[in-house]
Image (cartoon, rainbow, N blue to C red):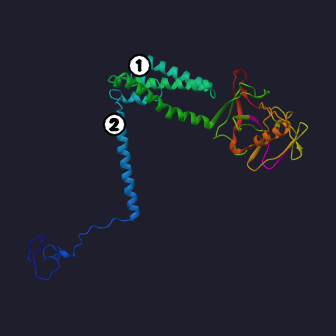
Amino acid sequence: MKCSSCDFENMPGQERCARCNAVLNLTQIDIEPPRATGSVALRRTRLGVIRSTHRIGFSFSGILQRLRLPRISAGAPLGSLVMSLIPGLGQLVLGQRFLGWSILAGWCVLMALSFLAYGSVAGSWWRALAILVHATAIALAIRPGMTRLSWRGRLMVGVWFVIVLNLTIYLALSWTTAGFCGALQINNVADTGIVQNGDTIAYTGRWLRPDRYERGDLVVYQLEHGYGVDRIVALEGETVTIESGRVLVNGQPLPAEAMPLNGVRRFPDLEFTVNQGHYLILPSNLNWEAHGGNVGQLIRQMLHRNCQVSASDISGLAMWRLRPFSRFGAVE
């Protein structure tokens, strides 16, 4: 039998070549490839994921081609683009010292004004101007790559910069700031020594708020419509009774330091048992009125809806009075 590998003539009946030890009976060789490992469902899932990834990649490439976004970075030094994450530093890298320091100073002033007006409409406007200055600084840093664009292309690039900056850097900055501290501007309340109309109150954000509040804590909390600021009168499971302008908690007079900001002289006689997971807050400084035949009943219904506040509806502890600057200081 002739070997197919080395052409050596072997004796009939031999299974392997005497010279090269190759298999002589080729019918014993399994030419079927091995099956893929794993179950059929797993292979189909893997194949589906691969195909979906390819489709998403091709779709994204198609979108970019349809938008025809220009290669605006051509001709612009990479260092200036990276340093432009802080407005003005890109110009300093390019040697434009006066322009760079002017942009940086203007941006710092706008950001400082936005923080000073934190929690107000003016603060949002100062922040928007800071974003425009930042986008302008990036556009100036890549100006060599924008000379080929029409005015429509430059406008599109500028709008794109503003959107990206707002959704990335500044949205992350706002989210981080709110995690430490929130701000509430007070309007339409009965003035007290602690809270007055026009005040902006800073309160603890989601990262600093306590796990449990105590009686007498001054908190910012959510109402049916809007927010309120007042003291916690009672904790879960406690019974609160209002009788002739007095507040009793489990039959004991409420301490003066835990009384609502504007007292309870406007409140009718009531009795509450605080539900599980709730706190009792009497909205003493809100301007509320009731009209109709049974005024007392209307007021009781309103109080029963708004006095028991769940822990999730308490935004945080009121800490500081930010504005007006004449009243700037800690709230107690």
Quadrant placement of the N terminus? bottom left
Residue 95 or 25: which is nearer the viewer? 25
Secondary structure of the residue carrying numbered label 2: helix
The location of residue 231, given as percent across then percent down, is 78, 37
Is-magenta flag for residue 234? yes
User: Foreground mark, 2 or 1?
Assistant: 2
Which tag, 2 or 1, sits closer to the chain's start? 2
Side of 58 relative to 226 (left or right): left
Is-magenta flag for residue 313? no
Above or below residue 28? Residue 47 is above
* Range covered by the magenta-colored residues: 229-240
| Residue assigned mark 1 | 96
Q: Residue at x 73, y 49 (%)?
A: 277
Residue 287 or 200: which is nearer the viewer? 287
The label shown at residue 65 is 2
Instruction: Tell me where residue 70 sits by quadrant.
Output: top left
